[in-house]
Amino acid sequence: MSAIASKAILVINAGSSSLKFTLFRDSGQGDPVVAVNGQISGIGTAPVFEAKDAERRPLASKAWQAGEASDRTALLRHLLDWIEERLEGATLVAAGHRVVHGGVRHAAPVLVTPAVLEELEGLVPLAPLHQPHNLAAMRALAEAHPELPQVACFDTAFHRGQPWQAGMFAIPRELTDEGVRRYGFHGLSYEYIARRLPEIAPELADGRVVVAHLGSGASMCAIHAGRSVDSTMGFTALDGLPMGTRCGAIDPGVLIYLMRQKGLDAGAIEKLLYNRSGLLGVSGVSNDMRALLESADPHAEEAVELFCFRIAKETGGLASSMGGIDALVFTAGIGERSSPVRARVGDKLAWLGVTIDEAANTANAVKISTADSRIPVYVIPTDEERMIALHTRNALAR
Ligand code: ADP
């Protein structure tokens, strides 16, 4: 990796059975640059390590037999050893982690210490499906390479400055006080967009912008003058828009019905709402937007329509939270690549003065609204990894 400058930053996004990583080179000038992308999949069963260069050309791969490398520490040691061999004189200065929950306390990334780890452990009940895996990766890395500084970057942090109304449920206050409140997620993505948008459209730097992050997880955020004001995800990443397999906003009375009439317990409800709902549940065909758009099944069409209906509806709500709207931005897998979804949402927002330029939309152009559209509409690829690398660099400098 002769292209690597004097410093390198490792970005880690750890899930239940996989760990995605990106190695950035950092000359200290401008943004860090991607050198390697990769992942370790099959953690806990039969792990596979794969790495590619910035042009997606394979660099390395290794498969372990079932049971051979079952613990994360050994796998992270392999990853770090592989990285060390490729640094060619450069220094790995830190690892930055995507961490789903920073609670009410963390409005910014923090250097990981045993005390921070313990505090983040306390947030596991708020994000039981993600937080334990994020923390396990930090612990394993600390064990494998205790000298390497680690920085935790939170998906909730960008939303911490929201007005209190955006964070509160109308429930007894003692529950709010113990943390049952709206946190908002996808914050690293929104923060990246808030940073990138003024480079594309300087006049929007102080504007009121609705951003739709439409991936397999999907949410929307109201950003005013670069700060999060409101978001569709709440206490968990289940609220708001319907997603690939998650239900999005639902009448809580449905949960009571499921318990009382169907005898479902917490685990069964969790599986139903996280894994069997959303686009998959409505269509019965797929959780993948591409498959739904290609399908002739009327239920697939209904799933697409419901998704777009809810995006348009949330746009109205988020605009109201800002007292107006000056721009709409699409990002993430579906937002960046699905022109039919964007066109449909645009049609539903015609009342607001949105007009989509068909040719620009089909081409996934940066600006997809017509010149006379009252609200400009942008497509901006998100880059959560780069945001984490930037945060990690800044946290080290502090
Ligand atoms: P994640 O949320 O897992 O990071 P992405 O942001 O990559 O995922 O989004 C993944 C989703 O993007 C897929 O489920 C797929 O439905 C959708 N997608 C990707 N490419 C296209 C496309 N060309 N047209 C429509 N949908 C797409």
Image (cartoon, rainbow, N blue to C red):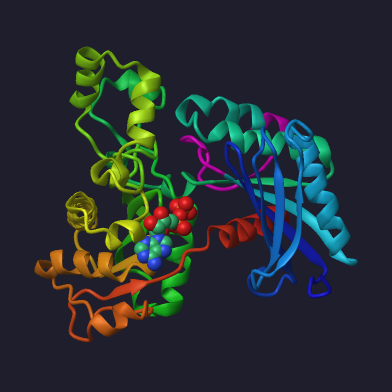
Give how far across and how far down residue 60 sits, in percent: 77, 60
Asked if the magenta segment contains residue 108, the reply would be yes
Image height check: is 102 above or below 268?
below
Identified at 29% across, 39% down, the residue is 247
> In the figure, residue 332 lies in which quadrant?
bottom left
Image height check: is 122 above or below 265?
below
- Quadrant location, the C terminus: bottom right
Identified at 82% across, 43% down, the residue is 77
Q: Please state if 274 lies on the left or on the right of 78 as rendered.
A: left
Give how far across and how far down residue 273 sits, in percent: 33, 33
- Quadrant location, the N terminus: bottom right
Point out the quarter of the image occupied by ligand 1. Answer: bottom left
Asked whether residue 215 appears in the rendered view, the answer is: no
Asked whether residue 24 appears in the rendered view, the answer is: yes
Give how far across and how far down residue 303 sits, in percent: 23, 50
Q: In the rendered picture of this protein, how many numbered marks are placed on residues?
A: 0
Give how far across and how far down residue 41 sits, in percent: 64, 45
Residue reaching furthest to the left: 351
Magenta segment: 99-116
Q: Please state if 182 lies on the left or on the right of 257 as rendered.
A: right
> In the figure, residue 275 lies in which quadrant?
top left
